[in-house]
Image: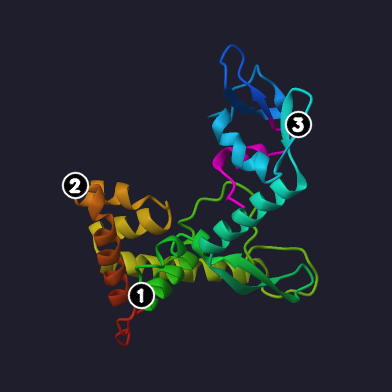
Amino acid sequence: MTEPARWERCLARPGARLLAVTGQVGRWAVYPQGDRRRRPLVRLCAEELRPALSDGRLQCVGESYIQTEAGRMAVKRVSGGYRAQHQSLQLCNVIERNGAFRGVQHNGRESPVGRWSHFLGVEQINAAEQFIADYHRSTLMPSVTRNWNLDAQIRVPGRGGGAEGGALGRMEATQRIMRVFDRLGRRDGEIVTAALIREESLAALGRRYARNPRDGRRVVTGALDRLVAVTSRPRRSGCA
């Protein structure tokens, strides 16, 4: 059995139909909801239908084609392999409303640092994750909706802390972030904020700070090396 083509993945969408293109002999297209008035998802020729027809992945219904169960399973199998190839599943704990912990899986590559984990070291990742956590907890992060942070003021009985503890935690996080900015300097501080908080791409970072989109990786690794150095620096006695 041949692997499903791109048009088969489009046809797997709910309601999609494979119809002949009006006025074009031998041309087919996948239309959303089987509506020719809408823009087709993909176009193809009659030759491209033969592998799916011979393998029993297509079924003729009136003037259109739809996928058989074998066709849907083939697309699902390929899509699952693609997700597995591009995901890094990790187990983490989340806190339920009653305060109990529950283990869940999440894709580590969805985080601002996870997308670059293939070229970052462990120390760089840890320093970046700590910076992100402190920044989001600090007063530097604008609040535009309800605050779901664990240190926010809540009315659920049984959880300590309250508004005073949350305010102190935000102040401490702000102080840590400001110390990091002071030690990083203006340029590295801007790079770290753009990469980790605004989640800008490597190309954008390279274009802005190295005048070459291909240098984004070097820009990010250099700034994170500097972040590791300033966050691991021992504190002097008598200083905050």
Return the residue at label 2: 211
Could you say which quadrant of the image residue 178 lies in?
bottom left
Q: What amino acid does circle 1 point to?
A: Gly
Q: Which mark is residue 60?
A: 3
Q: Is residue 179 above or below residue 197?
A: below
Q: Gap between marks 2 and 1, in whole Å?
A: 25 Å
Residue 156 visible in the shown view: yes
Q: What amino acid does circle 3 point to?
A: Cys
Structural crowding at the residue carrying mark 3, measured as other residues with C-alpha within 10 Å and reported as few (<14), some (14–19) or many (≥20): few
Could you say which quadrant of the image residue 235 lies in?
bottom left
Return the residue at label 1: 121
Q: Secondary structure beneath disc 3?
A: strand
Q: Residue at x 72, y 26 (%)?
A: 64
Q: Gap between marks 2 and 3, in whole Å?
A: 55 Å
Q: Secondary structure beneath disc 1?
A: loop
Q: Residue 174, image x and y in percent?
A: 44, 65
- Residue 71 shown in magenta: no
Q: Earlier in the sequence, mark 2 or mark 1?
A: 1
Q: Nearer the viewer, residue 194 or 173?
A: 194
Q: Which residues are magenta?
A: 1-17
Q: Nearer the viewer, residue 17 or 64?
A: 64
Q: Nearer the viewer, mark 1 or mark 3?
A: 3
Marks 2 and 1 in Cβ contact (< 8 Å): no
